[in-house]
C-alpha cells in the first residue's frame, strides 16, 4: 500500500500525516492558511486555545531532535492537549519489548495521537498501519524518506516572504540523497506550483534519477544559484552515509558551502533557509546564517503554528463512526 493511501479517511480528509507526496494542493493551502491563524497564539499573553482540550498526544522520538520534538510539544500545549514525552532510552523497548507491544500499552492509556520520529524509512507508516482506528500518527521524520511537517513549515516560511509560489525559483543545496527534508520540500514545492526547483550538490549526494522527483540537477553551485528566490541549505547527514561519499569538509565547504560571495549570485532579495541543525563552516558561513537574508530562526518559530494546524486538522476531523450513525 502506498504511503498516501493510508493517511486519508474515506472522505479524503487527513487521518494521519505521513507524507506530502500525493496530497492535493488545496490540502497544503488549507494547512498554510490555518497555520496563519494559529501564528498569533504565540504572541498573546495567554498562549493557549481550547481546541484539543481533553486529547492526549504522545511524542515517540527514537532519534535525536531539538526543534521538531519541542515545537510539537509546544504546539500541542498551545492547543490545550495533554502531552506525554516518552524517553525511548529508558522505555521498555530497551528491555526487549517490541514496538507493537509498546504501541498496545500506549493505546491502553487512551492516547489520541502519536508523533513518531524513527531512523527507519517507513516507520511512521508501520505505526499507522497497526494503531487502533481512533489513533492518529504524525510523522516527525522517518529515515531518509519524509519529514512532512518540516516541509510544510518551510512552505509557510517561503509564503510569508514570497506569496506567489508560481513565480519562484528555489534551490535546494547539499546532501539531497539522505535528506527526508529535501524529499518533503520537493513534493510540496511541486504541488504548490513552483515552476523551477533546483537540486544542487556533488554527484555522490544527489539521488539517481533525481529529475523524476521534479527537479533540475546542478553540480556547479555557481550556476545553480544564479537568480534564485530561495536558497535552502542542507546538513551533511553523516549518520546516514555509508562509505566515503565526500572529500574533506574543507573541500566540501569550498565547493558547496554558502558564502556571501556565492549568495550574491542569487536574487538580491533571496531568502536563505536551513532546517537545522546547522554546521557552520561546513554547509553555511556564519555571516550568512546570521545575516539579513537568513530566515532560519523564523522557520523554527513557524514550526509551532504549522504543527498546531496539522494536529488540529487531523484530530479535529469528525469521527466517521459518529458521522455514520
Ligand atoms: N529540522 C529538524 O528536524 O530538526 P531536529 O532534528 O532538531 O528536530
Image (cartoon, helix red, strand yellow):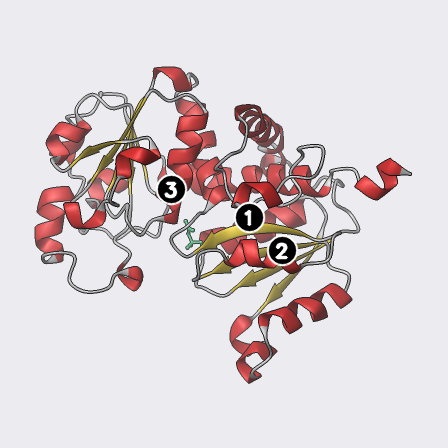
Foreground: 189 or 66?
Answer: 189
Q: Position of residue 207 (x, y in %)?
A: 26, 45
**Residue behind label 1 places its C-beta within 8 angstroms of ligand 1:** no
Q: Are marks 1 and 2 in contact (CB under 8 Å)?
A: yes
* Residue 294 appears anywhere in the view: no
Give the CA distance from mark 1 to mark 2: 10 Å
Name the element at disc 2: helix
Q: In this view, which residue lies farthest toward the right?
A: 325
Observer-side mark, 1 or 2, equals: 1
Give the CA distance from mark 1 to mark 3: 19 Å
- From the image, tell me which residue sits under label 2: 129
Q: Position of residue 68 (x, y in %)?
A: 49, 51
Image disc number at residue 1: 1
Q: Position of residue 23 (x, y in %)?
A: 54, 33
Q: Give the residue drawn at x 36%, y 35%.
A: 295
Q: Give the residue drawn at x 23%, y 51%.
A: 280
Name the element at disc 1: loop
The quadrant holding residue 271 is top left
- From the image, tell me which residue sits under label 3: 183
Observer-side mark, 1 or 3, equals: 1
Q: How many other residues sit within 10 Å of disc 2, few (<14), some (14-19) or many (≥20)?
A: some
Give the CA distance from mark 3 to mark 2: 22 Å
**Residue behind label 3 places its C-beta within 8 angstroms of ligand 1:** no
Q: Is residue 49 above or below residue 114?
A: above
The quadrant holding residue 16 is top right
Amino acid at each position: 500500500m502506498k504511503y498516501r493511501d493510508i493517511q486519508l479517511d474515506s472522505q479524503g480528509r487527513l487521518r494521519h500525516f505521513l507524507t506530502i507526496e500525493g496530497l492535493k494542493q488545496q490540502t497544503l493551502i488549507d494547512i498554510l492558511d490555518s497555520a496563519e491563524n494559529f501564528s498569533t497564539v504565540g504572541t498573546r499573553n495567554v498562549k493557549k486555545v481550547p481546541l484539543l482540550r481533553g486529547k492526549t498526544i504522545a511524542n515517540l522520538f527514537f532519534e535525536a531532535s531539538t526543534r521538531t520534538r519541542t515545537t510539537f510539544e509546544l504546539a500541542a500545549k498551545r492547543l490545550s492537549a495533554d502531552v506525554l514525552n516518552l524517553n525511548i532510552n529508558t522505555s521498555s523497548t530497551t528491555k526487549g519489548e517490541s514496538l507493537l507491544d509498546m504501541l498496545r500499552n500506549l493505546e491502553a492509556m487512551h492516547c489520541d495521537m502519536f508523533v513518531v520520529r524513527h531512523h527507519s524509512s517507513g516507520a511512521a507508516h508501520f505505526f499507522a498501519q497497526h494503531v487502533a482506528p481512533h489513533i492518529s500518527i504524525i510523522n516527525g521524520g522517518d529515515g531518509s524518506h519524509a519529514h512532512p511537517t518540516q516541509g510544510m513549515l518551510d512552505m509557510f516560511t517561503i509564503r510569508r516572504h514570497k506569496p506567489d509560489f508560481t513565480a519562484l525559483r528555489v534551490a535546494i543545496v547539499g546532501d539531497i540523497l539522505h535528506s527526508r527534508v529535501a524529499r518533503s520540500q520537493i513534493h510540496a514545492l511541486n504541488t504548490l506550483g513552483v515552476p523551477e526547483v533546483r537540486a544542487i550538490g556533488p554527484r555522490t549526494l544527489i539521488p539517481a534519477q533525481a529529475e523524476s522527483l521534479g527537479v533540475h540537477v546542478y553540480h556547479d553551485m555557481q550556476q545553480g544559484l544564479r537568480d534564485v528566490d530561495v536558497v535552502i541549505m542542507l546538513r551533511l547527514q553523516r549518520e546516514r552515509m555509508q562509505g566515503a561519499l565526500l572529500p574533506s569538509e574543507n573541500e566540501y565547504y569550498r565547493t558547496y558551502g554558502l558564502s556571501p560571495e556565492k549568495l550574491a549570485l542569487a536574487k538580491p532579495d533571496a531568502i536563505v533557509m536551513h532546517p537545522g541543525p546547522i554546521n557552520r563552516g561546513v554547509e553555511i558561513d556564519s555571516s550568512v546564517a546570521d545575516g539579513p537574508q537568513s530566515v532560519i530562526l523564523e522557520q523554527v518559530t513557524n514550526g509551532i503554528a504549522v504543527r498546531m494546524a496539522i494536529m488540529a486538522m487531523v484530530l479535529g476531523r469528525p469521527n466517521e463512526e459518529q458521522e455514520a450513525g
